[in-house]
């Protein structure tokens, strides 16, 4: 359901961030700043973008849907792909790390979910596109499981280094862990047709060259090049569950996660995942 501006105003602080007013100089300044951050470090944060009452409602929704979380305790490489026996054991394709985390998949969200409302808003999508500064338009993702899930992490959970199956991810932190749960990333470590395996392996081996940290707080909006920048969430310390909303965007609205990627992260693959698995657009491994 398309969110009206009145409804969007209940979610986004449109007084401070008038993303619905294309002629606003405040919006133009915001776009310039987000593009500068994306160009400089492959990521940007807009503080207090989501209204506190909307964050409270999203937290209540995530808590209510918590029993539906798909929990994954498994090992995977950064590409969520099978090992390649033709490559050395220390190659990134053969470097597996343990993950324990969960997703409240997009297809279990109620129709009136605030997360659905903001994700389905063309005003919001247009703002994300303008902020990224890409020449090609972006689209809401066709993937029924991963288009806009909640990420869930509890005590001692860890989400190791990985790449996303979609080009761009928008993160909205809903509840912060008591300690840990810090987002770390390496901006633009790879690009289409250049995997940069040497640098990837440096990071997997514990190297810190190029690693940046972003300690989000509830209400922050984060824009991020998740397909090209390897990233992780550090181990959760303490009893507070970390919830984060993850609206995702792509260049190709038809493409979905490949089936093995969907199974690793969301617990299953649909018939459409298998039907569209050959639709690769950038030559990257996953």
Image (tube, rainbow, N blue to C red):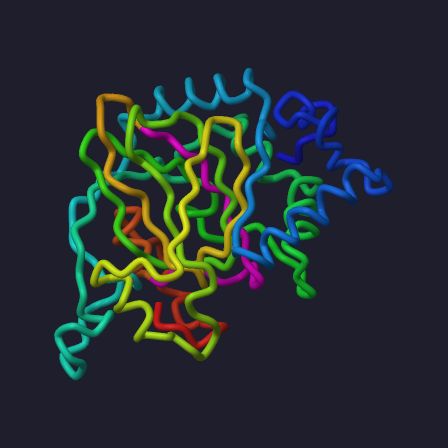
Q: Is residue 151 left or right of residue 83?
A: right
Q: Quadrant of residue 16?
A: top right
Measured as percent of width and height from the top left, residue 164 is found at 40, 57
Q: Quadrant of residue 194?
A: bottom left
The image quadrant where one finds the C terminus is bottom left
- Closest to the observer, 46 or 107: 46
Measured as percent of width and height from the top left, residue 130 is found at 70, 51
* Residue at screen point 29% across, 49% down: 265
- Closest to the observer, 183 or 51: 183
Instruction: Using the image, determine if residue 267 lies above or below residue 24.
Output: below
The image quadrant where one finds the N terminus is top right
Instruction: Using the image, determine if residue 76 lies above or below residue 177.
Output: below
Asked if the stretch drawn in magenta spans residue 253, the answer is yes
Q: Quadrant of residue 62?
A: top left
Measured as percent of width and height from the top left, residue 114 is found at 54, 27
* Residue at screen point 54% across, 26% down: 112
Q: Residue furthest right?
A: 23
* Residue at screen point 66% across, 53% down: 35
Magenta span of residues:
242-258
């Amino acid at each position: 359901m398309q969110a009206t501006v009145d409804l969007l105003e209940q979610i986004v602080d449109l007084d401070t961030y008038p993303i619905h007013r294309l002629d606003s100089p405040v919006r133009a300044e915001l776009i310039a700043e987000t593009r500068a951050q994306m160009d400089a470090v492959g990521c940007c944060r807009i503080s207090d973008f989501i209204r506190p009452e909307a964050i409270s409602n999203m937290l209540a929704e995530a808590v209510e849907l918590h029993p539906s979380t798909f929990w994954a305790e498994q090992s995977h490489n950064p590409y969520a792909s099978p090992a390649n026996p033709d490559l050395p054991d220390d190659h990134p394709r053969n470097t597996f790390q343990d993950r324990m985390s969960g997703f409240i998949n997009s297809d279990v969200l109620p129709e009136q979910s605030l997360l659905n409302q903001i994700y389905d808003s063309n005003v919001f999508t247009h703002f994300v596109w303008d902020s990224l500064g890409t020449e090609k338009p972006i689209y809401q993702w066709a993937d029924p499981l991963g288009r806009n899930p909640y990420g869930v992490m509890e005590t001692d959970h860890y989400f190791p280094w990985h790449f996303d199956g979609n080009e761009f991810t928008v993160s909205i932190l809903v509840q912060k862990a008591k300690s840990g749960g810090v987002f770390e990333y390496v901006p633009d470590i790879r690009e289409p047709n250049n995997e940069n395996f040497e640098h990837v392996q440096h990071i997997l081996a514990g190297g810190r060259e190029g690693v940046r940290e972003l300690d989000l707080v509830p209400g922050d909006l984060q824009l991020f090049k998740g397909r090209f920048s390897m990233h992780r969430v550090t181990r959760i310390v303490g009893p507070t569950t970390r919830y984060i909303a993850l609206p995702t965007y792509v260049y190709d609205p038809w493409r979905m996660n490949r089936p093995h990627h969907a199974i690793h992260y969301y617990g299953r693959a649909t018939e459409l995942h298998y039907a569209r698995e050959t639709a690769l657009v950038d030559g990257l491994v996953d």
